[in-house]
Amino acid sequence: MVLLVFSLLIAAAVGVGAYAMWSQTATEKSPVAVRLRELRALYPSTGRPGYGEKPPFLLAFIAKLGGFLPAKEGRDALRTGLVRAGFRGSQAVLVFLGSKIVFACLLPIVWIAYGTLTGHSVGNVLFFTVLWAFAGFYVPTFFIGWRQRNRTADIISALPDALDLMVVCVESGLGMTAALQRVSSEMRTVSTAMSEEFALVHQQMQTGVSRADSLRNLAVRTDADDVYALVAMLIQTDRLGTSVATALRAHAEGMRVKRRQRAEQLARKAAVKLAFPLVFLVLPALLIVILGPAAIQLMKALNPH
């Protein structure tokens, strides 16, 4: 029974792979697509993968698998979550859905092979096969959530430094658009996420998107309270016509105070977090080492026989 299930899974994987290879090698009849491929060959993209470049074969294959999942109603929410995690490619949603299928099939296949070789019972193999399939299906979701949290924390940590640089640029005579471009290039070595977000805001302004809409898109992409506050301040300053440099300086000072308060809060939490390992792990071992020899001597003295 186990070998039959294993064979069926392998056959399904081979069939899906063959279909993906066939669809990848199929000729395109549309003259527009042919012309776009010719232009792409003449003027290759210099950006990151996923910004107009043809994805590698593996990502294309995973994207083909993602097309089998009926998630059209939640594609916008998925795309928003992937953008907040730093994945903006046109095939990002399909790759994410396809990775769910890959992990949901790969982990059970590995477990079936391991259980067959080690002689596990059929019931045990089937139970853990279903369990591993369920866990594999949600592995990409957990990864995207972890990536979102790390990226948001990185942006919040680098935001005060970026605001200081922006204050210097604006006070030196640069406009908001030029200041964003300059800060983006200077922050690339400190925070890649912050640099990418400011560069995208600058690109949107250059392509004709209004400043307010570009800043609102920045807040939506980052999903950080500090960025929402910065965007609200910049939009309000633009509407009222007040000095951007003065508003940025005041906001940067507040951001530095908030970052210092976060550091102090984490320092105060350290004592509480250390209580559990000290009480339940360190102190028992220390008591055994200190009182152990004395307890042995006491037991020998009380029970000489």
Image (spheres, rainbow, N blue to C red):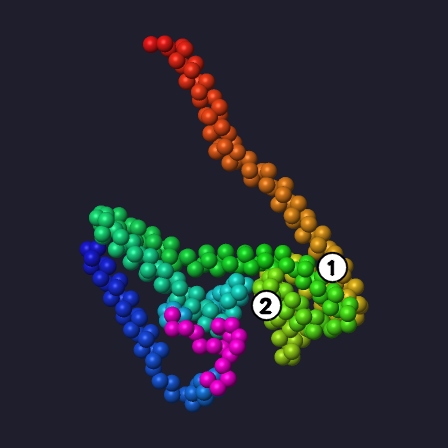
The relative height of residue 144 versus residue 73 in the rendered view (above or below) is above
In percent of width and height, residue 222 lies at 59, 63
Dot label at residue 196: 2
Is label 2 in a helix, a strand or a loop? helix
User: Residue 211, how many percent across, how many down?
Assistant: 68, 73
Three-letter amino acid code at the position of disc 2 = Glu
Q: Where does the C terminus fall, quadrant-wise?
A: top left
Earlier along the polypeptide chain: callout 1 or callout 2?
A: 2
Q: Residue at x 74, y 73 (%)?
A: 175
Which residues are drawn in magenta? 41-58
From the top left corner, tell me how far across and down residue 34 is, in percent. Answer: 43, 87
Residue 241 lies, with reference to residue 103, above or below; the image says below
Left or right: residue 239 compared with residue 119: right
Residue wearing tag 1: 251
Q: What residue type is labelled 1?
A: His
User: Of residues 158 and 105, which is closer to you in this image?
Assistant: 158
- Could you give the CA–CA distance between mark 1 and mark 2, rounded to whole angstroms? 21 Å
For residue 115, side relative to residue 77 (left or right): left
Q: Tell me which corner region of the image, top left, top right, bottom left or bottom right, holds residue 101.
A: bottom left
Residue at 78% x, 68% y is 171
x and y percentages locating residue 286 in the rendered image: 49, 28
Label 1 neighbour load within 10 Å: few <14, some 14-19, many 20+ = many
Quarter in which the N terminus is drawn = bottom left
Q: Is residue 99 left or right of residue 126?
A: right
Work out whether residue 44 or residue 156 is closer to the camera in this orientation and state it: 44
